[in-house]
Amino acid sequence: MIIMDHFTWDYQDLSRLWRFCLLVTLLCSEVLSQQRFLVEPQDTSAIEGSTTVLYCKVASRIGPLQWTRDSFALGMERNLPGFDRYSMIGSEWEAGAETIGEFNLQIRNVQLEDDAIYDCQMGAVEGVPGMRSRKAKLMVLIPPDEPVIEGQPIISVILGRPTNITCRANNSRPGADITWHISNRRLTDRIYSRSVPQSVGKLVDSVGILTINATKSDSGKQLECRAQNEALNEPRTVTATINVQYPPEIQMSINVSDIREFSFVQFSCHGLANPAFIRWRWFRNDIQMAGETRNRLTIRAITREWHEDKIACEGFNAVGKTRKQFTLNVEFGPRFTKPVEHQAVDVGQTAVLRCEAEGNPPPHIIWTKKGSHHIQGSSPELKIMKVQEGSFGIYVCTANVMGFNEISREVYLLENGKPKIMSDAKQYASRGEKAKLECSAVSVPKPFEIRWSKAGIAIDYPSSGKFSKHEESLPYGQKSILQILDTGGEDFGDYNCTVKNIYGEDMAVISLIEKVVPPLPYIIGGAVGGVAVLFIIILACVLYHRYKNAESGSVLGSYTDTDSSSDKKREKSDSPSTLMDQWRQDYNKDFYRYSADYDEVNLGFPKEGKANNNAYGVIEPYPLEVGYRDDGSVFAGEYQHRTDEVGSIERFEPTYNGQYPLTSFKTGEYSDSMSRLPPPDFSSKLATNV
């Protein structure tokens, strides 16, 4: 093509142009007269079981035409013998100077084996080369199997623990796209999917994994897995129910709000769990309590040893365990925590008395001196500065906890000095038996030596073979016990006990005296006699009660009698008929004197028109006419006689020197005034201090 400005065409130029166009026309005609492809097959896909067509359109075909599948020729006939589902469809027609032909490959009921590379070929003839179309890929689409959620229909997950849930959709081509949904809401987080070709064949297995961290609100919800590929218009779905499992959620309770010592305490634990079955264990200070497998722990009488202990119940199921703990606060009364410690000081020194107690709440400590209510102190330590003579004595420490009984103990504040022996001067033992001599000494400070001797010779314990001693500590000193095995006649006599401390010593003579044991026949005789006396007393009581019953019946039957009849009965009763009657009559003569105006015994039945306060028929005695003068001179032994409306003292008999009259009776009355006598004066006999 020539382009020029101001170009002038001439005849020669036009001739050359005409020849050029003729040559091009001849060449194009030659080309169009050769076989060629007008439409070549394209990559396509088909759903398994459907019908698909691969297109091939040719012009000026000279050689034979056929289709190949994966380079395997299918045949040149349109019905493609040997391939029932395959055929070449279309027609041929003339279009001007050339022939147009359609040789489209139709595949019915597409199967996986049809998934291949196809091309359309025209064979070569003499002078005309063969032609092959472009290769076309036919992909057979196969929908996945019904998806499956592993563990369906109920998917158990654990509360608060991330759990992977797997959904599989197998045997598809291409691989399925898996999505997850809860309550029609698509999940997009923590999702992983992949497709894995099978080792044999062209199918693909698809898997989708959802990582879920479920809450309790998710329990019971429907989890949906959807699988879809190009072979499906609608996804295939499967659902499963979410079951959120969790260990027991425990509530712990106690039957009392304030725990007091020795009270009944019961702990209870209740819980919700999934799975619902809960097993129980109990712990005390993280140590499992044997045999406690119920949801209740019972302490029938709790003690202070449980105070501040940690009680825990643990519930567990197949998922896990949960523990609830309670720290005990046991209220208990005071208790001294250390043994009493007595103190000994010199005059002018400082004394510290200690009294430590525990309790819950902590106890209040009060110090007093015995015999006084004056409070000396209120702390566990009582400090007395510059002790005086009047400071020595017994101090009382009282510990008190609100709501409990208080406790007290005595603490001695002693003055240092030489010992003083306070044992009995005479002590007894039997021949042939083990004897014990006790030598107790008040000694502050404690004695450093207690020595026994006899006849001026110190007792040699190892060589004697029968003497031994041991000592016991006393709050105010020491006690030494001398033991003698198989006491013989030579062992009786006087022993010297010498006690020494840093301030001095004391010595006392203690006599061991043989205890006289009556002979065996005497003992047996005394026992038999005692039994006989007891038998006689019992017999007398039985006879007496029988007589009383008979007499009561006769008296009851005489209430309607006249006074004269009563006198007759009294006269009749004056004559004794039995041994018991004689005894009673003598007793009345000696000890009773009845009033002249006395009519009859009042057994508790009121007479007509008279009130009777003695409802039990007891003979009411007169009060004692001799009164005891309680005017401060109790121990002087003074008594005064009283004359009043009752009469003079001569009315009462018998008397003892006119000083202490026996109980007198009038209409059966008595007095208990004689029980108020001055106490006897006993003086103990101590060992003789030398």
Image (cartoon, helix red, strand yellow):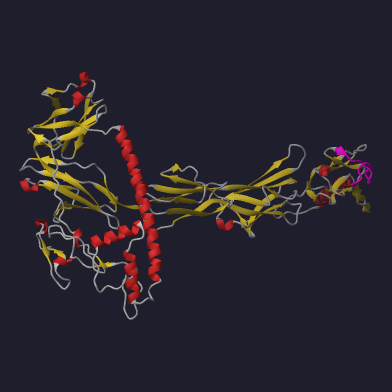
| Residue at image coords 31%, 77% | 611
Q: Is residue 257 in view from this perspective?
A: no
| Residue at image coords 84%, 52% | 50
Residue 674 placement (x, y as % from top left): 19, 60
| Relative depth, front residue between 335 and 225 | 335
| Residue at image coords 45%, 56% | 253
Residue 311: within the magenta? Answer: no
Question: Looking at the figure, which quarter contains the C terminus?
Answer: top left
Residue 81: within the magenta? Answer: yes
**Residue 550 horizontal side relative to residue 512, left or right:** right
**Residue 286 horizontal side relative to residue 467, left or right:** right
Residue 326 placement (x, y as % from top left): 41, 51
Range of residues picked out in magenta: 72-86
Residue 389 placement (x, y as % from top left): 5, 46
Q: Relative to 254, say whether 489 is above or below.
A: above
| Relative depth, front residue between 554 and 630 | 554
Instruction: Label the magenta part by its dominant secondary structure.
Output: loop
Q: Is residue 289 in view from this perspective?
A: yes
Residue with the most extreme bottom position: 609
**Residue 333 horizontal side relative to residue 375, left or right:** right
